[in-house]
Image (cartoon, rainbow, N blue to C red):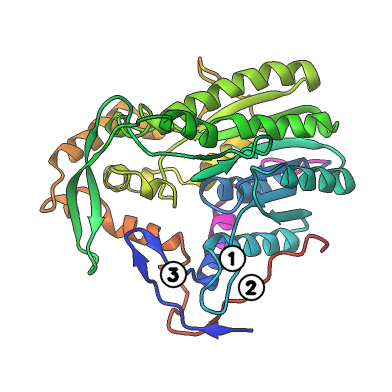
Amino acid sequence: MSERVISPRSRGFLFLDSHPAGCERLVQEMWEAAPEPARVPDDAPVALIVGCSAGYGLAATIAGLARTGIRGIGVCFEKAPTERRTATAGWYRTAATAELARRHGHEMVFLNGDAFSDAMKDQVADVLRQRFGRLDHLIYSVAAPRRTDPETGAVYASALKPIGEAYRTKTLVFDGDGTPEVKEVETAPAEGDDIEQTVAVMGGADWERWVDHLADRGLLADGFSTAALSYIGSPLTDGIYRQGTIGAAKSHLEATARTLDERLAKLVGGRAVTSVNGAAVTQSSTAIPGIALYVGLLRGALGEGMVPPIAQLADLWDQLTGVRPLETDEDGRVRLDGWELNSAVQAAVTERWESATTETITRLADLDWFHAEVQRLYGFAVPGIDYTAPTATQVPWPDAAA
């Protein structure tokens, strides 16, 4: 088994390697932070989490296991370790999650591949039929740069652009020494079919295809529920996010939820919703101009008052499983972001945003926390890990037959 010392090397917020031991410890921390089970089910619900290895999808998986006692299937797309490079962080996180599930007696199968493909949907359907019977819950949490349509073979690429006109915003960057700088950046507006392409990747088409695929095979249990994870965010980031190409995709996702909700109610007495989560540092969010600055300022304003993803997803599981009623807004969305979009919180963050410069940023934002959170995405800056010691990089993918 290959062992070596792994040091954090990055290009901006993107790290070139991941630390297996750090990723494992991070998963353990999330499991321990999950609220205690609200009740012990007589028959553990069967769940499918599409996009289970990172961000809110990882939180949904761990909260589902630790809080709700789910069993079932997680789907993700991660790269294996090679002789030169470590595996992706999601590979190590998935291995650690599988081990914790096994130790706690949860039957959880993890499949690695293209969630957009019909081949993966067929594989999931086969595992469901052979090992679990029917599906009670589906959590959809996929963020991807491109998607191949399984029917036509067309390849769609998502674009992170404003709609109508160029968008200027403050953003946060760190130089090679880790010194923070607040800069202004401009993003050109969407052109051509940028909006349609982004909706094809990040909208509700694949989510609906998953539900249809499993429904056609008679694999949805009575009362089946499904939630697609989403984000609205602050007016400070509206121009690039909710009012941009990604926002168009989120609107399509919400329209898909309404369509699925009506269909599932008739088919199995089921429900479909979008779950609007609060802000967090994720591999996806750090790529969006302005988001890093916003989240750092939000943490500066709220401190420990920020609600972590694991707590938010525990709340969602409680609603999906009937521990408490499923509550939606007028657009049929479960809102887990009230703590972030509270008017007093937004006023405090807006005041900090307007005052943020390279000279003032260290007192307005919690940059130590933000910088550590970015590193933790890749298994670094995790307390208790000796980063000077060699660590095994050749961690196997969880055995589906175990």
Magenta-highlighted residues: 28-42
User: Residue sitting at 12 percent across and 50 percent down?
Assistant: 360
- Quadrant occupied by the N terminus: bottom right
What is the quadrant of residue 354 in the picture? top left
Marks 1/2 in contact by CB < 8 Å: the verdict is yes
Which secondary structure, mark 3? loop
Residue 184 is inside the magenta segment? no
Q: Is residue 326 left or right of residue 160?
A: right
Of the image marks 3 and 1, the number of the one nearer the N terminus: 1
Residue position marked by numbered label 3 in the rendering: 383
- Percent from the top left, x then y, of residue 313? 56, 41
Taking the image as drawn, is residue 142 in sight? no
Q: Nearer the viewer, mark 3 or mark 1?
A: 1
Distance Cα–Cα, label 1 vs label 2: 7 Å
Residue 183 visible in the displayed image: yes
Residue that badge 2 annotates: 395
Residue at the (76%, 33%) spot, across then down: 213
Q: Is residue 329 left or right of residue 165?
A: right
User: How many residues crowd around disc 2 within 10 Å: few (fewer than 14), some, or many (20 or more)?
Assistant: some
Q: Please name the predominant secondary structure of the magenta segment in the image.
A: loop
**Residue corresponding to mark 1:** 92
What's the amino acid at mark 2?
Answer: Val
Which sits earlier in the primary sequence, circle 3 or circle 2? Answer: 3
Spot occupied by residue 381 in the image (x, y as percentages of width and height): 40, 68
Marks 3/2: CA–CA distance? 21 Å
What SS does tag 1 mark?
A: helix
